[in-house]
Image (spheres, grey):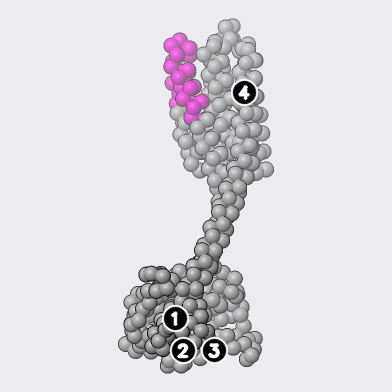
Amino acid sequence: MPRIARERDRVLRRTARITGLTASVTSLAYLAVPGGLDMPVVLFAGSLILLMVGCQYVLGQSGALRWAVCIVLLSNAVILVVGLAARVDVGLNPVEEALIATLAAGAASCVAPVLVVGPGRQLILFGSFGMTVAGVAFVTISSGGSVLPLVLTVCGWAALSLGGWWIAQSVPRVLQRVAAIGRAHQAERHASELEAQRRQGARLLHDTVLATLTLLAHSGVGVSPAALRQQSGDDARLLRQLRLGALPTPSRSGVYTLEPSNTSMLGSTLESVKQRFGRMGLEVDWHGSGQVLLPSDVLDSFLLALGECLENVRRHSGVTRADVTISDDDTTVRAMVTDAGRGFDLSAVGTERLGFAESVVARLRDVGGSARLFSSPGSGTTVVLEVPK
């Protein structure tokens, strides 16, 4: 059942429970009025009302039809007991009339909110209404009472039926509007994040690569060749980290924090890849080894091939989630990229399609690794990447 329908039914059940329990407690208070009813009637009616209280509480939890039927039957039984016990020559006293009206207009009609949804439940609603009206009419006519309990019964059932129908119509509309506002907020936030990333990228290029290119365009006037080589090397390392998904931050204008080590830890770089694709709408779940050491060139090829596989998932699979399992032994590090997307027929891929062959297979082969691809239409895709330690 959709979330909106579950929320609607929850509100209807709570409305029915609160209304029914309020009317039942009021009815028990009428039974306690001294001299209002004979003691045997009080004991019998009180027992039935207590059973009805339990049914009303359970109805608020489950909303099952059997509890609604039990409530209607019990309330009508109490109405008949109270009405038939009245003296014909005297008629219904004020306590008996108030008790009958409360039971019929509140305790019995509390089932209306949970019966307004669906044609089958609506038939039970009309049947329950007719049974209650007939019971009230019978006891009031046979005892010579007033028509006030009958009028209150009709008004109570009508009010709760219309109220339940209004809730059933309003809750889905409210939740849909809330969801629309949430989607608009998410889209605005995503646009703001993209704009912030674009501006950060522009500042990053201005502070580093463009500054170096400007010096080269002016033949490095005022800067020694050694300084130019150092600055160009820093820019190259920065671009490499950006391709691997890192987000370097400036320590001062034109100087960014880099990772100059020759051996990098795999666990410290996978998170940057995950964050990069998370910003692009692909949620990546990581499993397996958390910390693996790889030579710098092997790590670059491994992460770039892994990023290409995830990019293919993002662009072609039709899903927004992928799983990456990292494992290793004494000689090899493996990554298994899996998605539950649309998949494809491997035999239908033409030889002119060089993206996977060059960006993944050839890149890993250059560092002594390999890649294997498994896929079929409708069954998702799995890629296994292996590189030596």
Horizontal and vertical percent for residue 230?
A: 39, 85
Q: Residue at x 52, y 74 (%)?
A: 339
* Mark 1 element type: helix
Q: Can you tell which of label 2 and label 4 is closer to the viewer?
A: 2
Residue type at numbered disc 3: Glu
Q: Nearer the viewer, residue 157 or 389?
A: 389
* Mark 4 element type: helix
Horizontal and vertical percent for residue 148?
A: 62, 16
Residue type at numbered disc 4: Thr
**Rounded to the nearest whole Å, what is the CA distance between mark 2 and mark 1?**
24 Å
Q: Residue at x 50, y 73 (%)?
A: 206
Horizontal and vertical percent for residue 190?
A: 54, 61
Say which quadrant the C terminus sits in: bottom left
Q: Residue 347 falls in which quadrant of the image? A: bottom right
Q: Residue at x 64, y 37 (%)?
A: 165
Earlier in the chain: of badge 1 and badge 4, it is: 4
**Rounded to the nearest whole Å, what is the CA distance between mark 2 and mark 4?**
80 Å
Magenta stretch in the rendered image: 20-48
Q: Can you tell which of label 1 and label 4 is closer to the viewer?
A: 1
**Circle 2 is placed at which residue position?**
364
Residue 32 is a magenta residue: yes
**In this view, which residue lies farthest toward the left?**
330
**Circle 3 is placed at which residue position?**
358
Tell me if mark 1 has few (under 14), some (14-19) or many (20+) residues whose alpha carbon lies within 10 angstroms of its own. Answer: many
**In this view, which residue lies farthest toward the front?**
222
Earlier in the chain: of badge 2 and badge 4, it is: 4
Residue 144 is a magenta residue: no
Q: Is residue 237 left or right of residue 151?
A: left
Q: Could you tell me if the residues under marks 4 and 3 are in contact, i.e. CB atoms within 8 Å?
A: no
**Circle 1 is placed at which residue position?**
235
